[in-house]
Every structure is written in C-alpha cells, then in structure tokens.
Image (cartoon, helix red, strand yellow):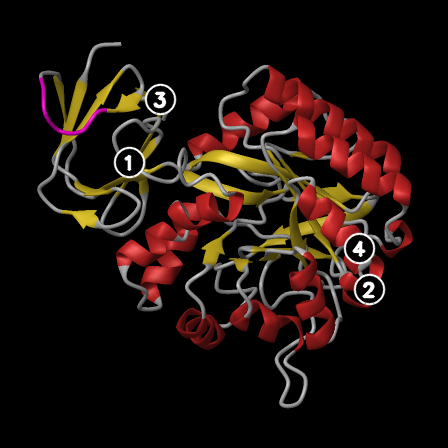
Amino acid sequence: MSAQIFTGAVVFDGRRLRPGASLRVEDGLVAGSEGPGEQVRLDGGILAPGFLDLQVNGAGGRMVDGDCTPDWLAKMCATHARLGATGILPTLITDSPEATATVIAAGVEAARRQTPGFLGLHLEGPHLDPRRKGAHDPALIRPMTEVDLLRLQDAAARLPSLMVTLAPENATPDQIARLAAAGVIVSLGHSDCTHAQARAAVAAGARCVTHLFNAMSQLGNRDPGLVGAALTEPVHAGLIADGIHVAPETIRIAMAASDRLFLVSDAMATAGSDLAEFTLNGRRILREGGRLTLEDGTLAGADLTLPQAVAVMVGLGTPVEIALAMATARPAACLGRSHALGHLLPGRVADMVHLAADGVLLGVWRAGSRIW
C-alpha cells in the first residue's frame, strides 16, 4: 500500500488533541508526519484511533450464543467496525456450559484466523448473583466449579484477551486469583456484594468492573458497595453512557472520582439493524425509543454505539480528549494492550475513525484502508 497523508482534521493520538497536525500512514501503520504520500484531505472534525468496545453482545439481528461460529464472529466484527468500533470483545451473556464451550471454540478459531477487529471474548456470567441478575436468565446463573475454572484458564491461554464478569458471591478469592494468574481479566458485576467482598476480590486479582452502577450494590453511607470499590480501588470500569442506564449527574460524580472509566456500548442484536425485537434465552427483548427492555421493562443491553456514547460524554461537559480516550486509550489499558491499541502513534496499526464536530461518524479505516 502506498503511503497516505491525512490532513484537514484535528488528530487525537490517544493522548492529546493535535490541531493542525497531519498523519502519515504507510503499509497499514502510522508512520508519523514526515515523508511523501498521497494526500487524503478530511473536511474538519477529528481523526482518532479506532474505538475499542469491550462489551458487545450482538449485531445485525443476532446475539453471541450457543450457535456462534468463527464466520459469525467475523461478520459481527465487521458490523461493529462500520459503527466505529474497529476492535471488540464479543460478549456471551449468561448461558449453559455447552454454549460457553461453543463460543470459546469459535473465538479460539477466530483468533487463529487473525479475524480483523477480534480482540478476544467477554464472558458475562454465568457466575453472577441472581439478586442482581438484570436481564440475565436466573435459571442459568450458578457458582463457579473447578471444571469452569479449568475451561477459563485454557481459554485465556488461547485467546488474545479474555474478560470474565463474575460476582464475588459465586466465585471464591482463590478462584479469582487463579483466573488472574492465567491472564483472565476478571471483572466484577451483577453483584450485591459488600464493599469488603469487592475489595477482597480486587486483592485477589480482579481489575475491572462491568457497566458501573448497573446491576450492582450501590454507594451507601455505611457500606460503599461495589460502586464504592469501583471508584476507589485501582480497577477499570465500563460505563454505558446512553443517557438511560446512568443519570448524567451520577456520571459526573463518577468522572470526578476515577480516571479509569471507559465506554462500552453493551450493544445487542439490534446493532447495525432496524430490528424492532429479538429473543434472549427465549425471552422477548423490545426496542423502542432508544431503549432495549424485557417485556417487564427491565433494561436488556443498550441501543448504542461508541460514537454516540462519546457525544453523550462531551454533552455532559467531559473534555473531548477525555471522552475520546474513554473509547480508545482507556479500554486498551484495561486489556493491558496499550502498546498496540488505542493510539495513533508511530508503529501502531492505522485503525482510525473520523468524527464530525458533533460526534457523528464520518468514516472508518482499518490498517489504513477505508472500510466505511
């Protein structure tokens, strides 16, 4: 591929905004700004690293489920790339051991094929607290067994990244420690744990919290709960910034307390489609007014893209560079892959998004080639 020089947009390199800068791309990699190349003139806006989404449950009318295949994961990654997320963790919501094994096998094969945009897997459950089940099927929630643990350890050795959301009530500190030692990103969520239980899980090796504020013990005056631990312990935390899952004032408080929050879409089968409803474990999920809910009104994922989430954060007064970092550099740090992802610096893969001043997605590039 011949070299290209991108000009005309403010460049966000994952660390700071660079007005007036140009970006040179050669052989699919960021090559700095010096040297010859074909001029690619952008009409204003911001050129940023491709967004990274660590909680993506489906796309194009399908969920990640027990029928998952490597080809389907590739299609899912391609769909989300066109929505601005050039790297994703396809996420399995609480399911059977057989479905979990199928998804892991598909993910391992997707990794072997070096599927573009496939960063690994996120297994959200089934080792959760049924008291904070959210839209998860309580009949499938269960404690972690030795068989589960061994399967996860093996998967972590064969996947680029593996995130597992669990509740301390259904996984012991020893199990958490063994998962962390195997390279699993242990994320706490769907939990009614006490602050002390959350701290013990972090001490054992948990280093993330799943969709902060949602489906977890809240910040109390005498027990800070999982929310309190997320905001005071050295952990990352995902945030669904759709204006529905978390109140604007609550987001502002959290932003003041932690610099480790990152954005997730929690996207479902509706992503990239005009689907009005779908099923999850045999239950109808309805799409209306930007919400996804069970028939009883329980929120069931989000009807959201990361560019939309960034725009929401900016609208709440978050500085643009911080809002962008929450979709790029911060999730890369959560994965432990800042050396490769979430930045537009020399030597990094030129996965990029072009955003208008109002946050609307204008273009997407993967390894320097425009895909949308």
258 in relation to 221, above or below: above
Determine if residue 41 is in view: no
Whether the residues at callouts 3 and 2 have beta carbons within 8 Å, the answer is: no
Q: CA distance from mark 4 to mark 1?
A: 39 Å
Magenta highlight range = 31-35
**Which mark identifies residue 344?**
1
Whether the residues at callouts 4 and 1 have beta carbons within 8 Å, the answer is: no
Q: Give how far across and how far down residue 326 sits, in percent.
A: 41, 53
Q: Earlier in the sequence, mark 3 or mark 2?
A: 2
**Which mark identifies residue 169?**
2
Q: Is residue 147 magenta?
A: no
Q: Earlier in the sequence, mark 2 or mark 4?
A: 2
Identify the image quadrant of residue 83: top left
Q: Give how far across and how far down residue 248 sits, in percent.
A: 45, 72
Q: Give how far across and how far down residue 310 sits, in percent.
A: 38, 53
Q: Amino acid at mark 3?
A: Ala
Residue matched to label 4: 174
Main SS category, magenta section: loop
Q: Amino acid at mark 2?
A: Glu
Residue matched to label 3: 367
